Image: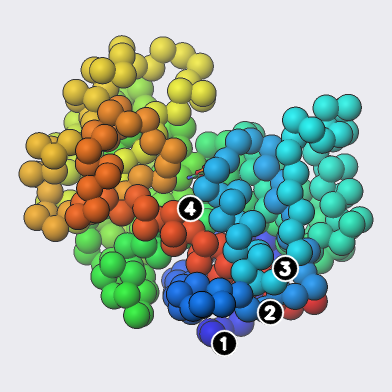
C-alpha cells in the first residue's frame, strides 16, 4: 500500500488534482486490484468507518461499486433511496446529510442532478467542524471524479498493468465524442487526461459542443485540448476513443435532428475506427444507448471495447478513494 500522505478532505472535482495525487490514486487502486484477485477479497482497512451512499439521482455502476468498495474495506454502509426517504415529506438535502452524520457517517458519497450539491454539503460539514468527508459521485453537468479516475486507471493499466501511472499517457491522443455539453464525465476526463499529458480531441455537433466550451474547463495542463464539429479529425490516429451517452434527460431544447442522423454523423462504428491507430481501444462510461453513440457489436467486442474493464476498475478505484480519505477516521 502507498505511504504517500493524502491531504484532501473531500473529493469534489479533479480541477485541483496534482500529478502526485493522480499517481497515488492509481497505485493505491493497483494494490486493491491485487486484493480483489484473492480468494478472500476483503481487508480490514476501514473497519469502524461508516460510508453513506446518498444518491439523489439514479445510478447503477457508481452506487453499486461504491457500496461494494466500502464492503471490501470492511466499512459499514448505509444506502438511501430518495423516493422512499423523508425528502418526500419536505426534509432538505442538508438536513438529510446531517441526519446521516448524526448516525455516525464518516464519509458521504453524493450524487445529485444539480451541480454544486456535494460542494454545498462539504462546506456545511466543514463549517460545523464535523470531520466528515464528501465524495462527489456525479453532480449535474459539473464533475464525476471517480469515473474519470477509473477511466484513467483502465487506460494506464492497459499500458502497464503492474505500474499504472499518468506519465504513460504523455503524447497519446484521446478522442472524446458525443454529448460533451451535458457531460460531467467529459469535464472530469479533460482535467485528468490533459494533466497526464494526453492530447484530448473533443468532437460533437455544434449544439452539443459550443465554441466557448473550452473556456469553461480551465486547463493549464501539459496536454492540449482541441475542439471539432466533425468526427474525422478527432479520430485520426487516436489511441483511445471515449464515446459519451446522449443525455436525453438533460436536453431541454431540440439539439439534434434525430438519433438516426446523429449515429450516421457521430456514431462510433468499425468503419470509423479505420481512421484511428490500429490498436485503438474504445471507452464508454455507461449507460449506453446501443446503436446511437456506438454500434452495438462494437460495444461487445473484447478486442476493441474496454467498457467491461471500466466497470471492473470502478471497484478498485473507489476502494482507493475511500481508503485515502477514510483511513484516518476510525
Ligand atoms: N457511469 C456512471 O456514472 O454510471 P451510473 O449512472 O450507472 O452510475
Task: Name the residue: 42% across, 32% down.
Answer: 181
4 or 3: tag closer to the N-terminus: 3
Where does the image place residue 156, in percent across and percent down from the top left?
33, 68
> How busy is the neighbourhood of tag 2: few (under 14 within 10 Å), some, or many (20 plus)?
few
Measured in 3D between alpha carbons, the distance from the residue under mark 4 to the one under mark 3, in whole angstroms, is 21 Å
Placement of 265 over or under 76, stated as above or below: above
Where does the image place residue 325, in percent across and percent down from the top left?
66, 70
Measured in 3D between alpha carbons, the distance from the residue under mark 2 to the one under mark 1, in whole angstroms, is 17 Å
Q: Quadrant of residue 89?
A: top right
Placement of 275 over or under 158, stated as above or below: above
CB under 8 Å between callouts 2 and 3? no
CB under 8 Å between callouts 4 and 2? no
> How busy is the neighbourhood of tag 3: few (under 14 within 10 Å), some, or many (20 plus)?
many
Q: Quadrant of the N terminus?
A: bottom right
> How busy is the neighbourhood of tag 4: few (under 14 within 10 Å), some, or many (20 plus)?
many
Task: Name the residue: 51% across, 23% down.
Answer: 249
In depth, the one of 14 and 24 nearer the eye is 24
4 or 2: tag closer to the N-terminus: 2
> Would residue 125 be seen by someone viewing this image from the given angle?
yes
Q: Is mark 4 within 8 Å of ligand 1?
A: yes
The residue beneath circle 2 is 44
> Would residue 175 be seen by someone viewing this image from the given angle?
no
Q: Please tell me whether mark 4 or mark 2 is closer to you in this view.
A: 2
CB under 8 Å between callouts 2 and 1? no
The residue beneath circle 1 is 3
Task: Name the residue: 8% across, 44% down.
Answer: 274
1 or 4: tag closer to the N-terminus: 1
Circle number at residue 147: 4
Q: Quadrant of residue 321?
A: bottom right
Amino acid at each position: 500500500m502507498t505511504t504517500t500522505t493524502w491531504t484532501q478532505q473531500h473529493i469534489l472535482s479533479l480541477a485541483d488534482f496534482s500529478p502526485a495525487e493522480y499517481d497515488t490514486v492509481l497505485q493505491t487502486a493497483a494494490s486493491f486490484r491485487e486484493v480483489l484477485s484473492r480468494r478472500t477479497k476483503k481487508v480490514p482497512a476501514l473497519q469502524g468507518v461508516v460510508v453513506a451512499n446518498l444518491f439523489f439521482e439514479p445510478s447503477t455502476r457508481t452506487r453499486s461499486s461504491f457500496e461494494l468498495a466500502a464492503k471490501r474495506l470492511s466499512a459499514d454502509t448505509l444506502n438511501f433511496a430518495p423516493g422512499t426517504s423523508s425528502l418526500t415529506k419536505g426534509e432538505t438535502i442538508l438536513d438529510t446529510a446531517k441526519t446521516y452524520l448524526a448516525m455516525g457517517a464518516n464519509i458521504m458519497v453524493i450524487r445529485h442532478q444539480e451541480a454544486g450539491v456535494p460542494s454545498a454539503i462539504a462546506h456545511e460539514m466543514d463549517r460545523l467542524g464535523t470531520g466528515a468527508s464528501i465524495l462527489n459521485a456525479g453532480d449535474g453537468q459539473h464533475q464525476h471524479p471517480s469515473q474519470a479516475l477509473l477511466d484513467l486507471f483502465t487506460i494506464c493499466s492497459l499500458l502497464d498493468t503492474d505500474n499504472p501511472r499518468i506519465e504513460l499517457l504523455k503524447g497519446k491522443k484521446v478522442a472524446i465524442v458525443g454529448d460533451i455539453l451535458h457531460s460531467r464525465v467529459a469535464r472530469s476526463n479533460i482535467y485528468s487526461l490533459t494533466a497526464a499529458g494526453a492530447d484530448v480531441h473533443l468532437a460533437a455537433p455544434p449544439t452539443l459542443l459550443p465554441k466557448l466550451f473550452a473556456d469553461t474547463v480551465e486547463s493549464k495542463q501539459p496536454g492540449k485540448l482541441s475542439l471539432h464539429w466533425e468526427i474525422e479529425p478527432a479520430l485520426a490516429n487516436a489511441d483511445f476513443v471515449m464515446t459519451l451517452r446522449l443525455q436525453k434527460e438533460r436536453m431541454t431544447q431540440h439539439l439534434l435532428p434525430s438519433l438516426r442522423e446523429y449515429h450516421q454523423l457521430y456514431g462510433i462504428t468499425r468503419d470509423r475506427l479505420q481512421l484511428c491507430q490500429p490498436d485503438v481501444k474504445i471507452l464508454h462510461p455507461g449507460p449506453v444507448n446501443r446503436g446511437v453513440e456506438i454500434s452495438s457489436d462494437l460495444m461487445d467486442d473484447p478486442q476493441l471495447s474496454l467498457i467491461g474493464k471500466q466497470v471492473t476498475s470502478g471497484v478498485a478505484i473507489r476502494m482507493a478513494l475511500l481508503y485515502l480519505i477514510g483511513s484516518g477516521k476510525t
